Image (tube, rainbow, N blue to C red):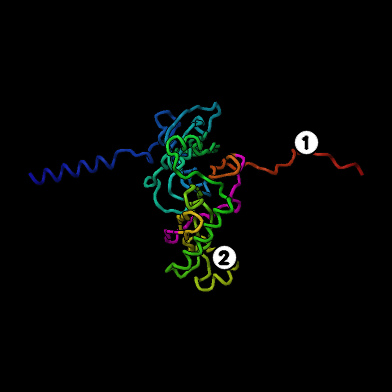
Amino acid sequence: MRELVILAAVVSALHAASLPTDTDVQYECQEDQDNIATLEAESFINDHHRHGYKFKFVSLDSRSAEEKKVRLCDTVVLGITLEETECHIVNPKPLDQCTTRMETQTKVKAKCNVTVSSVEGKAAVKRYICDTEPASHEILLTKCPDCPSLLPLHDPKALESVKTALQKFNKESDHKSYFKLMEVGRISTQWMFSGQSFFAQFAIMETNCTNKEAPQNEESCKALCGDQARYGFCKSSKFGNEEPVNVECEIYEAQNITHPMKHPFPCHGFVKIPPAIYPICPFPPPRLCRGPPDFIRPRPPPQ
């Protein structure tokens, strides 16, 4: 009897191993394969999102097939909704473990049109463009009138609280390396009896300076690159005018991540100004300095 049970278990395991998975299926842009395409779109967008937080797929809102054929597959345009999570891009946590923000935290949604086709039997994203917007302040006031509201990421007073928080972290940290600011992820504010309060989230990166030498020569400290650097994510709060800044940071082990783009707002036209969030920039990036075609360029005068 025991041998029959073992044999049945082996047969069941072999059968399960032989069943096709999403990675084994030949993607052909069919409607019943939209889950494959949306997963690829979610992954691709996050891989090319260089600032702010990871986004998670929420819903498929529309689909349309273009007439042009790519290999054996119609190119499909999917309208999808993504929501911003609480995981910053430097956080190595898998996306399925990241939670999306609640309404009271000013939820951020991205409506994207993603063009997907089949390349060697796999779903491949060709381009996308997204409209990224936070929930309106009126909605937040209706659901939570006492909740903090978002500030522009370049608010001077809020940035001063971030600077003070980072100085406090480096001073009290047990890490040998000095960390510098990579970017501010979010800033919110709330008025209290003691004055205006600030709540900030920001990413930091490890430098080639030690904690002892950095304060005297901060500008010369260069961020480490690639898999040599450790990154971190901090949350700070400053209650009122007189209270000291509180700060807590998570430091992640070195990982091979791509450095963010130099300019914090490479596609500011796709988000309300002044920006309080990081938008999902279009892919491929638009050519902003495109010259006129050759056939309309003025010809040089004859010699």
Between residues 146 and 234, which one lies in front from this camera angle? Answer: 146
| Residue 102 visible in the shown view | yes
Disc 2: which residue: 222
CA distance separating discs 1 and 2 = 47 Å
Indicate the amino acid at tag 2: Lys
Nearest to N terminus: mark 1 or mark 2: 2
Residue for point 37% across, 45% down: 96
Indicate the amino acid at tag 1: Phe
Q: Quadrant of residue 145?
A: top left
In the depicted structure, whether residue 60 falls above or below residue 164: above
Disc 1: which residue: 295
Magenta span = 246-269
Looking at the picture, how far across and down is residue 51, in whole percent? Answer: 53, 49
Looking at the picture, how far across and down is residue 263, in whole percent? Answer: 61, 51
Quarter of the picture containing the C terminus is: top right
Q: Secondary structure at mark 2?
A: loop
As for residue 155 lying within the magenta part, the answer is no
| Mark 2 Cα-neighbour bin, 10 Å: few <14, some 14–19, many ≥20 | some
Looking at the picture, how far across and down is residue 84, in whole percent? Answer: 46, 42
Quarter of the picture containing the N terminus is: top left
Residue for point 50% across, 63% down: 206
> Would you say 24 lies left or right of 150 here?
left
Going by the picture, which residue comes out furthest to the front?
A: 193
Residue for point 90% across, 42% down: 302
Q: Main secondary structure of the magenta part?
A: loop
Which numbered circle lies on residue 146? Answer: none
Between residues 124 and 200, which one lies in front from this camera angle? Answer: 200
As for residue 258 lying within the magenta part, the answer is yes
| Mark 1 Cα-neighbour bin, 10 Å: few <14, some 14–19, many ≥20 | few
Residue for point 44% across, 61% down: 254
Looking at the picture, how far across and down is residue 93, in whole percent? Answer: 39, 51
